[in-house]
Each structure stands twice: as C-alpha cells, then as structure tokens.
Image: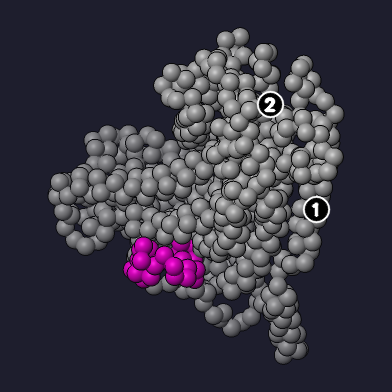
Amino acid sequence: MQGEESLRILVGTEGDSFPLMEINTCETEASEQWDYVLVANLRTQRNPRQVYQQQQFLEELKTKGFYYKVMEDQEKMFFGIRADSRLFDLYCTLLTEPEGPAPRVELAKPTLILATTRIRIVHFILSSKMAAADTFQDLVKDGVFEAMFPLHKGEEDLKKKWAQWGNMFQEQPLDDIRDYFGEKVALYFAWLCWYTRMLVPAAVVGLIIFLSGFSLFDASQISKEICEAHNIYMCPRGDGSRRYQPLSETCTFAKLTHLFDNEGTVVFAIFMAGWATVFLELWKRKRAHVVLHWDLYGWDEDQEEMALQLINCPDYQLPLQQHSYVRSTIILIVSLLMICLLIGMAHALVVYRVLAVALFNSAFPKKQVTTAVVVTGALVQYVTILIMTKINKYVALKLCEFEKPRTFSERESKFTVKFFTLQFFAHFSSLIYIAFILGRINGHPGKSVRLLGVWKLEECHLSGCMMDLFLQMAIIMGLKQTLSNCMEYLGPWLAHKCRSMRAKLGGTAQGPELRHWQQNYLLNPVNTFSLFDEFMEMMIQYGFTTIFVAAFPLAPLLAFFSNLVEIRLDAIKMVRLQRRLVPRKAKDIGTWLQVLEIIGVLAVIANGMVIAFTSEFIPRMLYKYRYGPCRQGAHPAVEYRDYGNAQDHNFPEQSWVLLAIRLAFLILFEHVALCIKLIAAWFVPDIPQSVKNTVLEKKDQRLREKMRSRSTDV
C-alpha cells in the first residue's frame, strides 16, 4: 500500500565481525537521520533471485553495523541506510594522531564527525565488494537495485546565497560549500573563481590589442600598397575559375588581418606566457591559505583510504605498489593508436574541406567559398569533438582498469592523464593543421597538389592563414561557451522536469520523509565523473585561452564571460538539479595542476610557432625594413608576400632569408618566454611566509605541550 513502511533494525551483535572500539569517542553532527538511500523497483519482489540478493546485501550490512528502514510507493522501494556510531568511533581512532607519548587516562574530548565525513565513510562501504563478490554496481546491472545516493538536507542557505543567477557577482561561500559538498568540490570552485579573476587582466590586454588593430586599419603602408595594386593580378583560385583576380580586390581582407595580426600580437603572446605562470603561482598561494584555514596540512589521502578499507574489512590486505612493463607497453601502443586515430580525424576534416570547396563553388559566390568552408569545417569539427569525447572517455577508463592502480586516488590520477591526452589531440589537431600545414603543401600554379589526383587541396584565406585560424578559434570557442553551457543547463533541467511530471502522474507519496526521499530520487543522477567532467571542461577552455591566443586575442575575454555563467550554472546544477555529490576530501586539485603547467609550456611553443610561421608579422617586417619601397635602395620589382620566383617557382634568396629569420625569432621568443616563466615562478613563492610560520608555530606549540605533559607525569 502506498505510504506503508516497515522498520528493520540491523545491529551487530556480540558475535558479529564488527570490531568494537572504546579508545576514542566521536560526536555525530546534527544532520539527516539517514546517511544514504537505496532504491529498487517493486518488480524485484516478484523475482526470488533478486529478493535473495537484496536480503544478502542487507544482511552483510548487518555485520558492518548498519540500520535500515524500508518504505514503498506505487513503483519503488526505498531503503534508508544509517551507520552505527561505532563506525565513526573507529574512523576517529585510526586517523587521530596521539597528542602525547602514551594514552592519557582522562577521557579525550569527542571529535566532531561532519555530515560530509559520514557520507564519505558510508559511501565507501556501500561501494566496496561484499562477501558474495558483488559490488553495489554489480547489483544495479543485475536489476536488484536502481540507485543509491546521499540525501540533500540543509541546502537552503546555499540556494539563497549561491545557487541562483542573481548572485553571479557575489563572493563564493567556500566554507559553506566545503561543509556541504566536501573539500574537493570547494577547491574546484576556489580554483574556478581564482581563474576567472585572473582572466580580467588578460581579457583587458587582449581587447586592447584587438582594438589597436583598428588604428592600423587604414594606416598600414602594406595595406595601402595592396589596395592600390590594380595592375597586379593573382592566379585563378580553384579549378572552376579562369579569372585572374586583381590584388586590389583583397584590400578589405588585408585590412581585416591587422585587427588581430599586428605588432601587438608578439607583445600579447609574451604577456600571456608570463600571465599563465603568475596565475599558477598565485593559485598555489591561494590554495595554501585555504588548506591552512581548513586544517588539512597534516591530512594524507592514502592514509584515509587505508583507514576506510580497515573499517570496511578488518582482514583487509594492503595492496603493494606494482609495475608491469608488459602492461605499460600495451597501454602505450593503444594510446599511440588512439592519437593516430584522432590525428586521422583531423585529416578527415581536411578531406571534407577539399570536397566542400568543390561543392560550394557552384552554390556560393567565389569570394564567399573560403569563408563558407571555414565556418562549416568548424561546425563539423565541433560535432566530431562531441563524439570523440565519449569514445576517449571509454578508452581511457578501460586503459586505467587494465593498468590496475592500487588506490582510488591513483586510479583517478592515471585516468586524468590518459583522458586529457586524448582530449587534447581531439580538440587541437585541426587547429595545428590550420596553423602549420594548411596552404603549405598545395604546390604552385600550374602544378597543384590534388587529392586522389582530382580535387585541388584547400588554400588559406585571401588574407592569410591567420584568418583561418582566427575563424576556427572563434567558432569553436563560441560554440563551446554558448551551446555547451545551454545544453549543460537545459539538459539536466528538462530531465528533472520530465521525471517530476511522471512522478506526479503516479500519485503523491504519503508522509514527509518518503516525499523527501522521492524528491531526491527524481533529481538527476551523479557519478564519479561529475566533478571530473567540470574540471576537464575548464582545462580544455584554458588550453584554448593560452595555446593559440596569438591568433585569437579575444579568447580570454570570451573565457571570462563564460566562467561567470559557468560558476553559477555549476552551483545551480549541484544544489537544485542533481542528487547530492558524494563529498571527497582533498587538499589540492591533484593532477590537474600538472596539466595546467604542461598547457603553459605548450602555449609558449605554439604561440611562438604561430607568430613565426602562421602570422604575417615577420614577412611584413622583412618587407618593411629590407625589401619594401620605404627602404632606401629597395628593389622596386619585389612585391610583398611573394618571395618566390615567378618563372620556375623555385625559392630565391629572399625566401631563405625569411626562413632563417623565422627560425631565429622562434628560438628567441621561446627562450625569452620561458625565462619570464622561470623568473615569475622563482619570484612568487608557492607558499606564503605567513602560512609557513603558522604551520611552524602549531608544530612548536604541539611539541611544547608534549614537554609539559611529560614534566607533569614525572
């Protein structure tokens, strides 16, 4: 009957395997009565095997010291799970450091157990392998249970001052987030908030560099020469065209190029190299203050995981560190094959662009064909990225399982490295092609390189390859910041509304407790990757913001506005639309910090190569000061940007001089940028002196208390 409920108490008896600990005493934070809720379909009660598996699972919880309560509605069975206080006594005993050389006779002050800690302990036990060799996920696959989740309770303050759009510009309540979602989620928002603040100077400088291009729109001498070159003709573009195009028709494109490809681009690229380093160093200092405030300096993740294993199973055997060269070789080979596949996907995009040129020649005016190809190519790449993201996650997860990491934290770290590596190639392979390959393997007029001997390879935009890279970056970042954010919010919102409407059609539950459980069940499910996916999204955005920023100086500005929305979007999802995340304890952002440092180094290399080989900055400077008409004694027959031989298309002396200058600039740029990064890293200490002094004072105080205690005993 709807609303009918039964109460069953499972408490370890004297003969149970649950160890009784009287060494320490813990106080339970005033929180929800039930730590967790399990959900099963009522149809399972008609299947004897599934009923037996349910009872077996619950009976094993009995030996671990759990209570449970069963309530039913018309379709589901809800099992409220509560852990006995002795579990938390044992947790305190294992992880509390003794304050003296020997246990004191007096009763120690009880240690407060937060709701986040209770949930973390219960989740670990429920997710562990049981005596029947089944985990809860195995039972879910067999249809015995449908879900398990901690309950939302006490989130009203977060809803009012954090999880609503009106609070977009308010400070993040990190302590409240930590008390409700745990340190891992709180550190994510602390990092995201800090990253967004640090984007402000980068966005301002990038906008100034972009706007400064307008001052060169009509003032550039090179643009004037191109606009006045009415008697200079370019070879026909494409196979269907027989028209020799005057160089002056590219006047508008030549002016547009200066908006983002000017002398300020070099300065901005060097600025961003220093910015990336300063951002990371200042974040390390911010993180040190936060960790000290939360008293996590002495906390060890491996030690807590070992303690949880012992709480779950006193006979737990510690797995030792292992390394297999065979496994590592297989993982390396599979990873390289996946990277080759992702690079092949970029080449498939090249094939699409070649075929699109042939198709669009009959559908668009000649001047719009290149733009249409670039825009549609970016759309195709965006869809490809969405598909490959799911494939990359599956492959990275399987490789991680094959590697057999020892602990959950080690598994998460290895998975992060593998997944990010695959995602990097998925997102940036096409950009690398456009920046460094597009238009450089096409041959020359009269001897064009053709795909399958039929279709002519795509050429750069009339204004140069920087325009192609700029458009590709603008479209991909624009789509990721708009469509992705819309889907990230609308998807969970619509799913929650649909589930709620279906539940209302089935009737309303009797009793406030059952209604509360149902409301939590109707929220969108979360998993191990929920917070991981948020971090990955930000890492990819950080890559777009730094790696090719020389071609797209507006990237920091777009990232800033996107992050303002992202912070509030994630807050609303976590508090209002999703089941409660399992709190995780942490004192840093883990492997993601190393990922950020790697992206910073890649940004220096990529931006140096973009300015040296993709931008027209060096050819313009060479033309301006060596071959142009403004230099005394310049050869009047030399025209800008074409240093080739018009008769046989061989490379004359000017081409080799240009190549030498490009290489010299690349070496100089990278050395200067890396030196700036090293100086910035040295100049800004990772840990503030105030934090170091506070830690030292606490250690000194603890030692003095031990000395006084020893003197009293004597």
Task: Check if mark 1's residue and mark 2's residue have beta carbons within 8 Å.
Answer: no
Residue type (three-letter) at the residue carrying disc 2: Arg
Per the model, the C-alpha gap separating discs 1 and 2 is 28 Å
Residue where numbered disc 1 is placed: 672
Range of magenta residues? 154-183
Residue 451 in which image quadrant: top right
- Report whether residue 134 is seen: yes
User: Where is residue 95 drawn, in percent x and y?
Assistant: 60, 65
Residue where numbered disc 2 is placed: 440
Q: Measured along the vertical axis of the image, is residue 481 above or below residue 202?
A: above
User: Where is residue 440 drawn, in percent x and y?
Assistant: 69, 26
The reply, left or right, for residue 675 in relation to residue 421 is right
Residue at the spot x=40%, y=39% of the render? Answer: 139
Residue at the spot x=43%, y=18% of the render? Answer: 362
Q: Quadrant of the C terminus?
A: bottom right
The reply, left or right, for residue 76 in relation to residue 61 is left
Residue at the spot x=68%, y=33% of the render? Answer: 436
User: Where is residue 670 drawn, in percent x and y?
Assistant: 78, 47
Residue at the spot x=68%, y=37% of the render? Answer: 614
Nearest the eye: 679 or 586: 679
Nearer the observer, disc 1 or disc 2?
2
Badge 2 crowding class, 10 Å Cα cut-off, few under 14, some 14 to 19, many 20 or more, is few
The overriding secondary structure of the stretch rendered in magenta is helix
Q: Secondary structure at mark 1?
A: helix
Residue type (three-letter) at the residue carrying disc 1: Val
